[in-house]
Amino acid sequence: MLALVLKILWLVWSWFELAIFTLFLYLWAWLPTRLTRPYFHQFFRIWCAMFVRALGVDLRLHQKYRNPLPKQFILIANHPSAFEDVGIPALFDVYPLAKEGVKRWWLAGRINVAAGTIFVKRQDRESRRDAVELMVDKLKQGHNIALFPEGGCLGKRINDTFQAGAFDISMRTGIPIIPVFLNYEAQDVFEWTAPHTLLDKMWHFMSSPNDRANFIVYDAISPEGQTDKFKFAEEVRQKYLIWQEKYLD
């Protein structure tokens, strides 16, 4: 009983801190760009880490790679839940790709815009092409990017195909891919499926009987020798199927 009371008090305090920091970032986000960059991106990462704490999720980073990771990379991950939208920036210094609808999220939308999040209309070919060019530009500026090759939040099982965008960018720039496999121990609780809303999922995270989230990082994958972005995408997807069998099946 005492443990439950302490957890509730901790969550209440964490949400209070998050609310104050969110208001601060939201007001800052309306200032001219020259007053937000490059500092806002780092404050955005702090905001994501505070969100993780407020949700009460036990986020664990597992470093399964054998060789040192490159200084610059394209991070990809499976996308079973909504949690990784804050979990990945909390752990990795990346500029994520997000669906266009995130821009309209209350408070968080404006904060993401100011933080440099790249947006895409998934069903719009021109928007996808523009997003690829924006990601290439981020890489040319020396930054890292993150995206979900499944093309959306499609459930806890790996999708039948991977979109080729990340792999095309890797081949064009020569920058390696870092694969991250996401494993939520309470799979059914964290999985985002219809008709649940984002608010529903936030409550599910906070009330989960098992709040452990494992973000497992594997060796970087070089685009060297790759000539077909679709074949490259499928080769990496096969790795995810192996990890799925290990952690989920």
Image: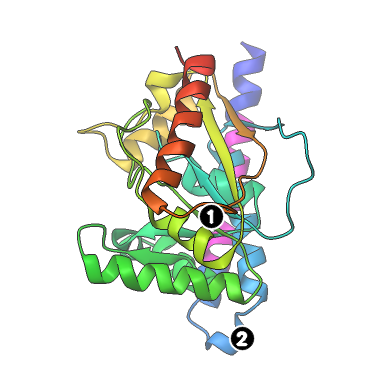
Residue 71 image position (x, y, % from top left): 74, 58
Residue range highlighted in magenta: 9-24
Q: Residue 4: image x %, image y %?
A: 60, 18
In the picture, which quadrant includes the C terminus?
top left
Q: Amino acid at mark 2?
A: Leu
Q: Does residue 15 show up?
A: no
The front one of 93 and 15 is: 93
Majority SS type along the magenta span: helix
Relative to 34, 228 lies left or right: left
Q: Quadrant of the N terminus?
A: top right
In the figure, 110 relative to 177: above or below?
Answer: below
In the image, which disc is placed on residue 228? Answer: none
Which of the two residues, 4 or 205, is positioned nearer the viewer here?
A: 205
Using the image, tell me which numbered label, if any, was put on residue 19: 1
- The amino acid pointed to by label 1 is Ala
Q: Looking at this view, is 70 or 189 the one in front?
A: 70
Q: Mark 2 highlights which residue?
A: 35
19 in magenta: yes
Disc 2 + disc 1, Cβ < 8 Å: no
